[in-house]
């Protein structure tokens, strides 16, 4: 028996969706971003700035209304511990996040201490700290050949996977796949990535909250959720991108998804889901998009916990799971639709 050739990378996993669509009349758009910058250099603690905004575009064509905003600044250690944090709006339990390490631990503490602000832009930003900090260091791959040797990637203290063990942690890291070297260790160097343009639509200058220009090794996780009502159904169009500035003066992305969903407004049940893998690092990664349909029939309000339980290990993609988990806020946002 001859060995089968490796599968081809899906062409659509190397193509950005481009800028955000124009806002619909009678819709709400939530945009969030988390920017990472290393003022003290490679391998050192870094600054993360989160920004979020909920914007209503009235059906009658009147002026858009800002419904809510949020902002945070976090100093993160090389192994993703929160060294310092401040946020707007303020919350009395924020100091209790200091010393917490990103990942399952940070999400547990967040749920326990700030559960009273679930559904708000602030909660979404803080929940996304885990995923944004996991990917942030990747931007150094565009600037340094030794980026994989950064302290947070040392096997003795890695914060990725199960203490550095990536076997079957997600669809992309299925054992035997292209995410691993011949010796079975993760291949953090030979990844696919794509040059991307701005997320802002040129004909809609307020379609995003302010996204500062980035240069040097700076990373951004950005997401957008548009929702509007059609009869008794809430329609959702969501976009997600992990990108950063490159030495040529442009931007390079390592992850990007576009997700379309339909949610029954009365029950909160997910009626339909389409997940499009736009940019992903390994040829196996797009397979997670098909498995995401397992969430159809579930209550989206429970997605922050349910997605992780239902799409664990090789059934899911860490970053697509983050996109789906953010849909938990759709019911709360839908209640703000006129």
Image (tube, rainbow, N blue to C red):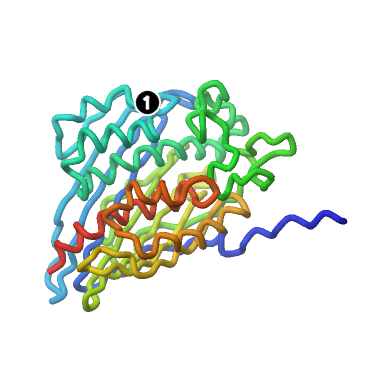
Q: Which residue is mark 1?
A: 81
Q: Quadrant of residue 110?
A: top left
Q: Is residue 174 left or right of residue 139?
A: right
User: Which residue sits furthest bottom?
Assistant: 231
Estimate the x, y position of residue 321 in percent, counting from the top left.
42, 51
Estimate the x, y position of residue 268 in percent, counting from the top left.
25, 63
Q: Quadrant of residue 105?
A: top left
| x 69%, y 36%: residue | 184
Q: Quadrant of the N terminus?
A: bottom right
Nearer to me, 134 or 218 = 134
Q: Quadrant of the C terminus?
A: bottom left
Nearer to me, 229 or 34 = 229
Estimate the x, y position of residue 234 in percent, counting from the top left.
26, 69
Nearer to me, 313 or 192 = 313
User: Which residue sits furthest right?
Assistant: 1
Label 1 neighbour load within 10 Å: few <14, some 14-19, many 20+: many
| x 21%, y 50%: residue | 119
Nearer to me, 208 or 115 = 115
* Residue 105 vertical position relative to residue 123 in the rendered view, above or below: above
């Amino acid at each position: 028996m001859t060995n089968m050739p490796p599968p081809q990378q899906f062409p659509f996993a190397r193509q950005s969706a481009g800028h955000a669509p124009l806002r619909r009349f009678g819709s709400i758009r939530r945009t969030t971003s988390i920017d990472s910058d290393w003022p003290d250099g490679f391998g050192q603690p870094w600054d993360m700035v989160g920004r979020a905004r909920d914007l209503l575009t009235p059906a009658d064509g009147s002026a858009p209304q800002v419904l809510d905003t949020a902002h945070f600044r976090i100093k993160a250690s090389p192994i993703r511990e929160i060294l310092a944090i401040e946020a707007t709006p303020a919350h009395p339990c924020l100091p209790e996040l200091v010393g917490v390490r990103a990942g399952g631990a940070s999400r547990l503490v967040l749920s326990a201490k700030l559960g009273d602000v679930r559904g708000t832009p602030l909660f979404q930003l803080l929940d996304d700290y885990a995923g944004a900090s996991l990917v942030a260091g990747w931007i150094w791959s565009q600037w340094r050949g030794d980026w994989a040797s950064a302290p947070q990637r040392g096997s003795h203290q890695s914060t990725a996977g199960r203490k550095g063990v990536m076997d079957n942690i997600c669809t992309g890291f299925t054992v035997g796949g292209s995410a691993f070297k011949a010796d079975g260790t993760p291949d953090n160097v030979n990844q696919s990535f794509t040059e991307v343009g701005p997320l802002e639509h040129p004909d809609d200058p307020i379609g995003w909250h302010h996204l500062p220009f980035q240069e040097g090794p700076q990373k951004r996780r950005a997401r957008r959720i548009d929702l509007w009502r059609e009869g008794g159904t809430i329609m959702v169009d969501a976009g997600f991108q992990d990108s950063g500035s490159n030495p040529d003066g442009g931007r390079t992305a390592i992850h990007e998804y576009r997700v379309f969903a339909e949610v029954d407004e009365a029950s909160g049940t997910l009626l339909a889901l389409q997940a499009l893998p736009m940019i992903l690092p390994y040829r196996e990664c797009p397979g997670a998009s098909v498995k995401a349909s397992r969430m159809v029939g579930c209550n989206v309000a429970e997605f922050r916990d349910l997605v992780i339980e239902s799409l664990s290990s090789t059934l899911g993609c860490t970053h697509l799971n983050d996109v789906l988990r953010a849909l938990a806020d759709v019911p709360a946002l839908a209640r703000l639709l006129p």
